[in-house]
Image (cartoon, rainbow, N blue to C red):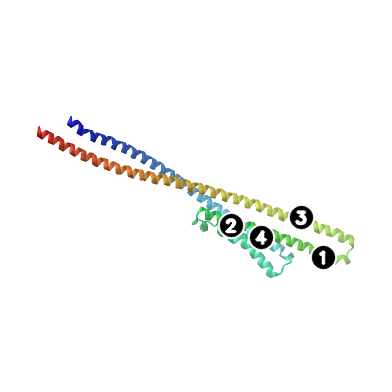
Amino acid sequence: MARSSTTSPPNNHSVDAAVLQYQNQRLLQQIDKQKHDLQALEAKIKELKDKQGSYDEMLITVNQIWNQFILNVWLGFLPFHGLNCVHQDDMFNSIMFCGGDVSLCLLQRDSIEANGNDEIAKYVEEALTLRHTSTRELLKLLEHTIYSHREKTESMVHTLDGKISSEDAIIQLPKIDDMMEREVKNLREAIDILHVKQKEYADVIRTYLSSQSTDQSEISRITGELDDSMTELEESRGKLVNLKMQKEVASGMHNLTSGAVNGTL
């Protein structure tokens, strides 16, 4: 009877050790799965970064085309503009600065990677605001130039009143007005197209930022679960070591007790 009572604790410890080993295996499987999920997310982030590089190149190209468009428009309307040279240069530099260098700097990959998602979104919004501002400034400039040109044309017609007949002047003035209206219409259509393209690129940027934020949240969640699992694993290992030590102590005591009983017999 005494011998059976001394063998009971080691059996209980063996059962506890087996349960802990099973729990450890489960934790290791969970950790392995989380590692695979983390690797998959890292691969997805790399893919998104590659896409970001492509988007950046596209934005740089669009920015260059935009600046060239502004330059062409400016050079085309400069002879008809009513401002003096100093004001012309100031306005041109202001438009080019708002529409070009700042937005390009803010949207460059190297300038935003070191910042968090909030900083990236802030920079992108600032760049888009600057682009809208430059577009409005360009439109105002074109309207001012067109109206100035129209006034000069009308003044020219009035000046020539004495050299040509009234009938000819009446015929020429509507033609000039029609020409200017067509130019205004064409320029407005071109600016509308630029607005549409700008909105498309802005939507692409916002979609990318949203997906990046989702991926970062998922990585944080999986990393937290992985840390929790590692903590549980360490606790289970500690319990397993304690149980093994208790088992060894209990086994030693059992051997001593058995030896003492056999000796007395």
Q: CA distance from mark 3 to mark 1?
A: 20 Å
Residue position for label 4: 70
Which quadrant of the rendered structure holds the N terminus?
top left
Mark in the foreground, 4 or 1: 1
Q: Circle 1 sits in a helix, a strand or a loop, which is it?
A: helix
Residue position for label 2: 126
Mark in the foreground, 2 or 1: 2
Residue position for label 3: 182
16 or 163: nearer the eye? 16
Amino acid beneath label 2: Glu
The numbered dot on residue 136 is: none
Q: Residues within 10 Å of mark 1 (few under 14, many from 20)?
A: few
The numbered dot on residue 155 is: 1
* Residue contact at pointers 4 and 2, CB within 8 angstroms: no
Mark in the foreground, 3 or 1: 1
* Residue contact at pointers 2 and 1, CB within 8 angstroms: no
Label 4 or label 2, whichever comes before in sequence order? 4
Residue 202 position within the rendered picture, expressed as x and y whole percent measured from the top left: 60, 51
Looking at the image, residue 19 lies above or below residue 111: above
Mark in the foreground, 2 or 3: 2
